[in-house]
Amino acid sequence: MTDSLSQEIGGLKAVARDWAARHQRIENLTWPAGKRIAVNFTADFDAMLLRRLNNEPPMQLAKGEFGGRVGIWRLIELFDAHGIKATIFTVGRICELYPQALKAAVRSGHELADHMWEHRVPKELDVERDHLRRTAAALAKFSGRRPVGSRSHHTPTLLREEGYIYNSHGAADHRPYYVLDDKGAPCLLELPFHFAIDDAMFFSFAWYASANGEQRLSDTDRVFDMWWAGFMQQYRQGGYLNVCLHPFVSGRALRIAMLDRLIARMKTLPGVWFATCEEVARHCLEAHPPKRNAA
Amino acid sequence: MPWKDRYTISNETSLADAELRWPQAKRCAVHVVVDLSVASGPEGITPRDIRSAPAIFGASEGLALVLAALAKHELKATFAVPAVTAEIDPAGIRSLIARGHEVAAHGFKHEDVSALSREEEKARIDLTTRILTDIAGRRPAGWFSLPRQKDPFAGGTISPATMDLLMEAGYAYMGNSLADDIPHYWVTDFASRRAILTLPYYYHFDDQFFSMFPVQGSGLENSDMLFRNWRAEFDAQYKRGRFFTMTLHPQHIGWCNRMAGLEAFLGYMASLPDLWNPTGAECAQYWSATYPAATTLGLEPSIWKDYPDSLS
């Protein structure tokens, strides 16, 4: 009895040790001269694709369509008005539905990054690679270059092989960190994203078919206060904030107004670095390169 | 728009703020929708819904309070009325029209039609139109399919045939779509550009999702959030010169502190200059004449490519 319990402890310790070894914190992280915090405004541009994938009813698709017809344009306008370069994680298929918006985003200097071909990661590795390549080629037609970042469950080693340098999907640390492969070799930089700073968690009804008792219905004053507190918590310690927005959610007029206030307030403080995810990733890779774990 | 069947219902981009013009050079449009259905779920109005205390309140005191508040601020509303509701209180429906409000159709009994056959759905639309025409003395110009509290999605349910059937039945507009925050066209056939005008709806401006939602007694009373949402959206849309819409249910919004919140908001809104407050039909008439589908909808052929390993 005691033996089997000890064995269980040993097993779980090994799992924890292996998992910890896949994550590498950046110690003494610094930002470019004069900068105290890096802020990434990111938009997940999936419009009605996710809802189509989940076979949701017509009105749900129409709700998503708001993102492509209205929301993405308002986000671009908002970022441009503040001189902010943002990162737009774009589902590959969106290129065939909203090309005008993507052209406008590139014209304004925003980064286009991968958000899966049709908002899913295929189980078969070959198909997964096809999806990744197809999305990269579709985005490159607009931006003139291959994307270097992703927000997805895509296999990290595959992303690495395909030339990606970062993913913005995990939350193992407040600050950017490295994920390593199973052999201890550095794989990708993670630009942490957290659901607490994600508009869909507060304003989107029936996210992933969640039941009515679980609905996220909130208001912009409440979310403004929470996100401001989040920003300040990181600002004080010279950290990082990734704000995840969905055009069909945050593109609503009341939320654009809230984001406008939030950005204006952030700008009252010195040393706020509003950058694209790629800029933050390249800074980290150059100033704080990953180390290979000793085997 | 690179059109894609079963993905898109309208064109690629909305009209920009600067392209919008309202009658008499008004600054912002305000559409008030009052839903008189007491249906709690997809089956539509049931005996149990009718035999509830809120149903009595909503049809009497709650409705009277909402009507008084609208009258005080000289606001007109579009009432979404199921055929069954009109049959239960025909005189009440007629009095709405006498007060200058519009009566629009809200289904036979505000039921989910998404699984009905085309024939069955057509029969229900025709019957509903006939009943409302007889009672109100005029044909309804608009049709609504608003969500109910127990629906899985807060957008309203329609079938693949609904929009076509409404056009066939002569409806000038459908009252709730989510693809824009101004009136927009819902296209049912790309080749012929067949489309119906839809008016915007959004659940964050609908009282039922902040009033003991998901069910009575849940304790999830968030009417303070509703009032903040109304105020924030109205202010933002007024500034942009666009369109504000709110959806009211007398059995919800008429109660106590909620009613006080509605009165305060209507008072604030009505105090601002240059509001255009059409009913649904007035809005549809203006929009169809000023921004006709033929010149407003820029639809481009699909550039979609099919791949064996992804959704078509």
Image: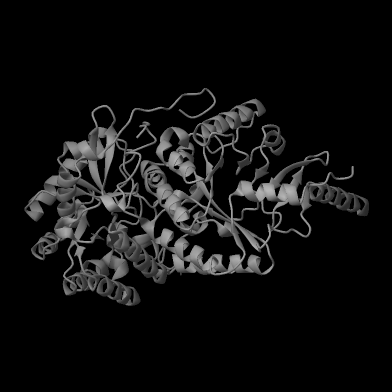
Query: Left or right: where does residue B175 sit relative to residue A174?
Result: left
Who's the residue at 10% across and 64% down the image?
A: B95
The image position of residue A30, as x and y in percent, is 72, 59
Who's the residue at 48% across and 53% down the image?
A: A211
Image quarter (top left, top right, bottom left or bottom right) of the C terminus of chain A: top right
Q: Is residue B212 above or below residue A133?
A: below
Q: Does the image show residue A33? A: yes
Q: Nearer the viewer, residue A14 or A238?
A: A238
Who's the residue at 41% across and 52% down the image?
A: A74
Name of the residue lying farthest toward the right: A3
The image position of residue B250, as x and y in percent, is 26, 66
Q: Does the image show residue B122? A: no
Query: Left or right: where does residue B287 sit relative to residue B232?
Result: left
Q: Residue B48's quadrant in the figure?
A: bottom left
The image position of residue B97, as x and y in percent, is 11, 61
Q: Is residue A97 above or below residue B14?
A: above
The image position of residue A66, as x and y in percent, is 38, 47
